Image (cartoon, rainbow, N blue to C red):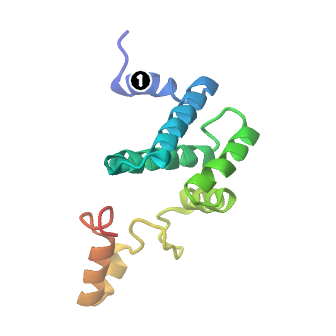
């Protein structure tokens, strides 16, 4: 019996559905080594590597905040406090706010500033030309993920 596309995708995703101590420690160790090299080097050519490593560090921080990096919740919290100092983001506060964002994202009946598109079509049509222009600049596909 042949699997459907959805079944194939679920089989593929299931390999990554639960955290692994080995993979988590390896990711943390390799990222720490890269950060150490970038922090201690005086070569400017390492700046792109440094920024990519900081981005990787924040991705790890994000996964720790969702308690999905290490299998143990307490260990996630402990490591999250340390990684939070590296990415200069308070772990507990960020985790609370980010989980709130996931819980309530794009619910148009609530006022939110962290939404991708906080206005519905009805409100957009009621706004003046200048407000719509500002809205398009702030939330438009060309500027939201680049300039803003």
Q: Is residue 22 above or below residue 108?
A: above
Q: Is residue 91 above or below residue 26?
A: below
50 horizontally vs 17: left or right = left
Which quadrant holds residue 89? bottom right
Q: Secondary structure at mark 1?
A: helix
- Asked whether 137 or 127 is in front, the reply is 137
Q: Total marks drawn?
A: 1
Q: Is residue 146 above or below residue 47?
A: below
- The image shows residue 35 at horizontal and vertical percentages of 50, 43
- Asked whether 84 or 107 is in front, the reply is 84
125 horizontally vs 21: left or right = left
- The image shows residue 74 at horizontal and vertical percentages of 76, 41
Q: Residues within 10 Å of mark 1 (few under 14, many from 20)?
A: few
* Residue at figure coordinates x 69%, y 58% from the top left: 92
Question: Which residue is disc 1 drawn over?
Answer: 7
**Which residue of the protein is positioned furthest toward the right in this rendering?**
74
- Asked whether 36 or 133 is in front, the reply is 36
- Could you tell me if residue 7 is visible in this image? yes
- Could you tell me if residue 18 is visible in this image? no
Which quadrant holds residue 72? top right
20 horizontally vs 116: left or right = right
- The image shows residue 66 at horizontal and vertical percentages of 61, 46
* Quadrant the C terminus occupies: bottom left
Which quadrant holds residue 79? top right
- Asked whether 127 or 4 is in front, the reply is 127
- The image shows residue 106 at horizontal and vertical percentages of 46, 64
* Residue at figure coordinates x 38%, y 9% from the top left: 1
Q: Is residue 13 above or below residue 48?
A: above
**Which residue of the protein is positioned furthest toward the front in this rendering?**
42
* Residue at figure coordinates x 49%, y 48% from the top left: 39
């Amino acid at each position: 019996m042949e699997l459907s596309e959805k079944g194939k995708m679920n089989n593929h995703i299931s390999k990554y559905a639960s955290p692994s101590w080995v993979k988590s420690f390896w990711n943390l160790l390799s990222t720490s080594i890269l950060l150490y090299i970038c922090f201690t080097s005086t070569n400017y050519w390492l700046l792109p590597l440094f920024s990519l490593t900081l981005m990787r560090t924040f991705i790890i921080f994000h996964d720790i905040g969702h308690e999905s990096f290490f299998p143990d919740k307490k260990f996630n919290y402990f490591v999250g406090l340390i990684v939070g100092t590296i990415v200069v983001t308070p772990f507990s506060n960020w985790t609370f706010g980010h989980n709130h964002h996931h819980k309530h994202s794009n619910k148009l009946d609530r006022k939110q500033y962290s939404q991708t598109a906080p206005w519905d079509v009805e409100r957009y049509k009621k706004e003046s030309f200048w407000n719509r222009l500002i809205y398009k600049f702030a939330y438009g596909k060309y500027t939201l993920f680049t300039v803003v």
